[in-house]
Amino acid sequence: MTKYDDIPLPFNSTAPLPTRRPTNSRGGGGGGGGGSSSAPGPGRSTTLKRGKTLTRPERHVAPAPLVAAPPTQSSSTPLPFSATSSNNGGSLDWWKLWSYATTFWAPPVVLGWFGIKEKQSRQAWREKVTLCWIALLLGGIVGFVTLGLQRALCPEKEANTGVYERLGQDDLTLSINGWVFNISSSLTQETVDFYALSKQMPGQDITNLFTRAVTDYPSCSASARYATTPLCKPSGTSAVNNNGTYQDCPLGKLDDATYSSLRIRNTSLLEGYSWGQVAALKDYLVIDGMVLNMAPYIQANPTAIKGDVVDSVIRTVLSNQTQSGKDATRLFYNRKVAQDAIKCMQSRYLAGRIDKIAPGCFVASLFLYVSLFVILAVVLVRFAMACIFNWFLSAKLVLPPKDLGRTAISPAVMPEGANVSVHNKTGTAPWANGGGSPNKKLMKNGKKINGLPNSSSTTLVNGVSNPDPLISLARIGTELFTVCLVTCYSEGEDSIRGTIESIAATNYSDSRKLIWVVCDGMITGHGEKMSTPDICVAMLDADPRFGNPMPMGFIAVGSGAKRENRAMVYAGHYVSKNGHRTPTIVVVKCGMPSEAKDSKPGNRGKRDSQLILMNFFSRVTYNDRMSPLDYDIFRKVQTLTGVTPDFFETVLMVDADTKIYPDSLKHLVNCMHHDNMIMGVCGETRIANKRQSWVTAIQVFEYFISHHNVKAFESVFGGVTCLPGCFSMYRIKARKDTDNDWVPILVKPEIVAEYSQSVVETLHQKNLLLLGEDRFLSTIMLRTFPRRKNIFLPQAKCRTVAPDTFSVLLSQRRRWINSTVHNLMELVRVRNLCGTFCFSMQFVVFMDLVGTVVLPVAICLTGALIVNSIITPPKSFQEAIPLMLLAIVLGLPAILILITTRKVIYVAWMVCYLFALPIWNFVLPVYSFWHFDDFSWGETRRVEGEVRSKGHDDKTAVFDGTTIPLRRWEDWEKSRLRKLRREEKRRKDMERQFGQGFHNDSDGLGVAPRGGWTRSEYESDSGSVFGSEEDVWGAEIGGYNEHNPAFPPPPIALPPQTSFEHGGLGGAGGGQTLGMDEMAAILDSGFDDQPPPPTFRPHANNVPSPLHRHQHDFQTPELQQIPTSAGGESVSSSIESRPHGGGHAKKRSAGGSGVNAVQNRYGPMGPLADEVGYTTRGGGGGFKGRKI
């Protein structure tokens, strides 16, 4: 008869994926039901909907990957982008062409002479030179704009700033022949009162008061009236003649002796006139920018002179241009006679000059003022916004959450896109409700296995076919389940113990945090007596139920043979000094057997250590295929914490030399509680060894200002570009605002796949992947979720050990600076970040990128500015603008220190930092830029006997992914049960042959003494296509039994669900509430099932083992041939349990035959509502399930 196989649909099918239908809450009152409102709170509707919208931040189109995907993916989930890259296939893109064009002068032969022989090394060198050339070009542009633009646009002969003094500007000044004279100490004459004249109009022309003769102007040799008219009344004649009036000249000649006698001083400034002033003054005109006072000429010649061209031009300008500035330049230059008179007229009648600004000078000044405004605005706005965030915004983020009475989606519900069976109407994970815990029965969609072949959805459940997809947030409380990841490499015991101790000692419940330590290889640090794994394992109070771990395979970050690795998982508790007993697992990457003689077996880098956690939670979130290591971690985490790993929502990543403050973890989790849009948050990192050396002293203020100024400002936009790897928290998955679905964040397949790339070709990709993994992860998250937030939380603090020698600092900053440049180059291309135009995060990223590249030029210009200001002090406001800007940039941080910390000592640390500015802004950037093609980790962490390596690769072997089995949790669980059954069978055979005491009671599976067992613990899995003796996966499963009753059961991490939640659901298992009569009937009949028939026990005198199976109402199916692929490749989990050629085609097309096709209706989105239930054979009466 036709049967629907409950096998999760694989992603590699071309048919559309079914999604679960809306899941309604059960009827009844209480906090979960009754209301139809979608508003948050207890009264909201408890319906889970798969609504699709384009307005959610997670719905945008995924950006193209920064790095091409590797040829072998560790996950069955395909990415939305192509795995191929334009760089593959040997094709040249524009960047390669540019690098070749820039380094055309260095052919391969020449590079070979200098030891650069490999093709990739040559390409990396060419790209490095190209990037350095770009940095020099940008630096040259900045230098030219700062120093050369003013001189180019406004030469000294046109730079009138500081040369003129505007008419009427300064008191006690008068002008003589165009020069400004100071009369503050002048002697008052009988006929001339200098003070009265200055009071009347400061700076006015008094040249006509001095005695002047025609012979004083040798350039006036013409016979025309403009050159021969007397400027003063001739002696012995009347002041009034036939034509006009001559000027009285009561003062002496225009010479230094006269000036000295009058005690007036030449200020060496030219008298300046504006065009408006010239137009307002009578008898004034302008020729070639020179202002001429024609009053003596007009008074001496009041009427026009017939036939005099110059006189005609003068009178035309004075009479017709009274409102336009009286510029006679064009009229004088149009006629030869008038043009020849220009020089004479300028010498006889000069009163001053037009205080003009040349176009070039105007543009230069405008650019200077605009630059001043923009830079000053950026500095002040960043300062102000950083202060606002530190004072007001951050204080709200650490407040404990209040709205926890509402009902939301359960962590057991998988997000959209996960491997969900078509029969799973709620979308819960197969391990929901404590799968695998003691006294649970092996169920299949709510019914006992009846001998038919099992599907991959078979799991251990607590007798509930459809676990509740909703949960009251009060059960989870204010403390989210958090993983604390500690990555170790070669640190010493004091550093590692200090880090783990600080995490365990936090005021965060031990039942809500899990310490996850990853040892990156079998490494012994420089000067250490014990290896790093031995140090970590020695700190662990190991749980005896797990015994000695066995190496488990997983796919690592690397190329060739390095893609495969093995790790051992130690599980137990860390007991802190203050009595905390925190669940802890230690993952030791031990490497493949072929690496036994290597110096660093198992070492794959920090990024690989992080990806062990990210891949694990990604596969748990999507119910994706797990590696043996993932399944082993799953079992141990569930046993230690009492909840399945899908309950963990956040992960705190810290380095092994970092100590966090006691309240930091709670602050970070409260921040995550405050806003679901926050996907990452970092705290303040302080230096623990401030006074160890001068190298550490110059870093104190740099750490402070990078957090409280840079990151605080970026937090206002929600776009912190770098969450430090030493102390940052990421969100594993986030609830939507409507609380009806999950959005994977850190474990999103696109992020995990891009972060796990190992095959890179260009220098840009290598700087992204191999240097600064924390910044690269932040870049990926901002590109994937541009509208979500990365923020900084100043209330969360930690202390870390900074480099104490200059060589280590040089190595560290080389990686940081190069990583910063290349990551900002990617972030500046993300257009939909917060803000718009200059008030956007994209503009901020662009400014940071340019500022980082031009650091060497900037510090050189700063030094030149200071030296030049000392030699030649500024004489005007415009000249002092650069100095004012420098003072503001350097002085504002001191104000920020006093405002935020109120610690004057930090001012002293700032002084140390300022003295080291040449190191920060010149030495370190120049060294980093020239080492763009150096991808080694450097001297930050030294290993005993280490040989320098540039990557985790071994191209002598090819990895095709077939050596690491990847199976879903359901399949691993069935194999575990089969392994337990084989071990039980072996034990009974040995007891039958050699007696009861022969078998070791404390074997690897944790078999307890016979007296402790009363009944069977597991149901039979005889429906599997594999026989108990033919299970090929047993060797990949840990040899222990976490459900051994000889050991304490897992802790209860969640309080039981109260009876008024979710419309009358009660009990920790989510069962129905029973009445008095029903409860009495259950007490009379007992809770346990009927014992198995005695014929199943070969020895009646032996106490039954927990591995006995219930064999009633089961039939053993015929074993099938195990399907294998060519070359001995591993079997896919979706094919493994397919019965007799059955596949997914019929099920995914919603097809069927016979009565089931009519009664069990399926639509394109999964099972339709109001399914008709049928009573199954062998499953007990009244069971509602599929008809077989």
Image (cartoon, rainbow, N blue to C red):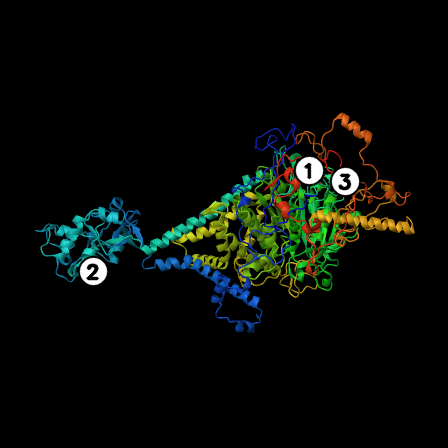
Above or below, 815 against 476 in this view is below
Q: Tag 1's secondary structure?
A: loop
Q: Nearer the viewer, residue 154 or 462?
A: 462
Q: Is residue 331 left or right of residue 1172?
A: left
Q: Amino acid at mark 2?
A: Lys
Query: Label 1, on which residue?
Result: 467
Marks 3/1: CA–CA distance? 14 Å
Q: Earlier in the sequence, mark 3 or mark 2?
A: 2
Give x and y (percent) for residue 624: 66, 49
Camera-near label (2 vs 1) is 1
Q: Earlier in the sequence, mark 2 or mark 1?
A: 2
- The image quadrant of residue 927 is bottom right
Q: Nearer the viewer, residue 98 or 794?
A: 98
Give x and y (percent) for residue 545: 79, 47
Query: Label 3, on which residue?
Result: 440
Q: Are marks 3 and 1 in contact (CB under 8 Å)?
A: no
Give x and y (percent) for residue 241: 9, 51
Marks 3/2: CA–CA distance? 114 Å
Q: Amino acid at mark 1?
A: Pro
Q: Amino acid at mark 3?
A: Lys
Query: Label 2, on which residue?
Result: 343
**Outermost top residue:** 1077
Q: Tag 2's secondary structure?
A: helix
Camera-near label (3 vs 2) is 3
Marks 2/1: CA–CA distance? 104 Å
Above or below, 1143 against 109 in this view is above
Q: Is residue 388 left or right of residue 683?
A: left
- The image quadrant of residue 34 is top right
Q: Tag 3's secondary structure?
A: loop
